Image (cartoon, grey):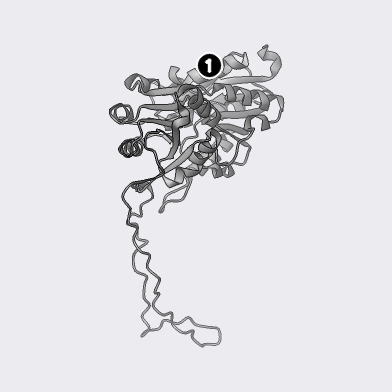
Amino acid sequence: MNVAKTGYRVFSANSSAACTELAKKITERLGVELGKSVVFQESNRVETRVDVKESVRGQNIFIIQTIPRDVNTAIMELLIMAYALKTSCAKNIIGVIPYFPYSKQCKMRKRGSIVCKLLASMLAKAGLTHIITMDLHQKEIQGFFSFPVDNLRASPFLIQYIQEEIPDYRNAIIVAKSPAAAKRAQSYAERLRLGLAVIHGEAQCAESDMADGRHSPPCVRNTTGHTGLELPSGKQQAPFPGIELPMMMAKEKPPITVVGDVGGRIAIIVDDIIDDVGDFVAAAEILKERGAYKIYIMATHGLLSADAPRLIEESAIDVVVVTNTVPHEVQKLQCPKIKTVDVSMILAEAIRRIHNGESMAYLFRNITVDD
């Protein structure tokens, strides 16, 4: 394909070889060369610098940014490159961000902030006009953006892996490691015509109520003093009585149980992100106790932080299958149980369709909200 005549360029916003691997696969499928740019850290300052080495005036620009462990540096690389392209008069700037960072911080917890919304605003300010991503942690994140967001799905590729790579998958059962993941697991089970099991009772540390002042008793107004409000007529309202709110009963976490029969079956746990693997290891242990003879983990984004590879290698988990939305080559060297599914095909097709103004509906055939 003659890049100069197509009116679009594909750049990688990351400097590391591991992170540019997905960008190279996408450009190979598109039949174009990766745009010439330099992304590096200043040696004498903790700063990111981006230099675009070719003209982008009046063209559609696609920036591919995979997120390594240094998330904040990757975000700055993306923002700086988008701003550089914007000031270079690019027509449209489309961010291809397979794993959207900070997607777990999409709800107000305690007195924290919705960081995902902040990041969406930063991307818009930097110049992005469209985003292609995959399996957002919550679908409602799309509402944070003031421009279009195409949330692609990895489930067709993972389901294909189950059908082609898991012997006797008809004897498998799809498992949700928590009730919150039941919808995704149900979608897999219905498409594969398999049974469904749900693990209930695991600790929900991220959702626990910590002492932040919200449980302090309400102020009781002293009714003996001047507590009423002055009205224009000089009369006073009746004083407010002490506030008595009904008390909620404290939650009592039940022992871990499995709803569904997994005895003599292949257990396939599905989720969108596998990062801290403690919950998955605990789930695998109880599934083994209940009679499952092989355990697979299927997830879109394999963050696999800290000592996750070692914990997986020492656990009852047999295979962990993730896509290449996040670079994890080092983790694969540490743990042979980790397998990768390539999703560059659908990302390349999304780029081609957006540039040509074609409908994206083809990429969402038979896709539902729960997928």
Work out whether 353 lies above or below 121.
above
The foreground one among 233 and 197 is 197
Residue at the (56%, 19%) spot, across then down: 26
Left or right position of 268 against 278? right
> Quick check: can you spot residue 68?
no
Residue 102 position in % (x across, y down): 46, 38
Image position, residue 289 (x, y; %): 30, 38
Q: Is mark 1 on a helix, strand or loop?
A: helix
Q: Which of 339 and 38 is in front in this view?
A: 339
Q: How crowded is mark 1: few (under 14 residues within 10 Å), some or many (20 or more)?
A: some
- Residue 204, position in %: x, y? 36, 48
Vertical placement of residue 158 versus 108, above or below: above
Q: Residue at the location (63% across, 23% down)?
A: 349
In the rendering, at what x and y percent does residue 367 appear?
Answer: 61, 36
State left or right for residue 283 relative to residue 229: left
The type of residue carrying mark 1 is Lys
Q: Is residue 194 left or right of residue 282?
A: right
The answer to whether residue 318 shows anywhere in this view is: yes
Query: What is the quadrant of residue 92 in the picture?
Result: top right
Q: Mark 1 points at which residue?
A: 24
Quarter holding the N terminus is top right
Q: Residue at x 48, y 31 (%)?
A: 75
Position above or below: 200 against 302? below
Going by the image, does 309 lie left or right of 370? left
Picture layout, residue 344 above or below residue 304: above
The quarter of the displayed image where residue 232 is located: bottom right
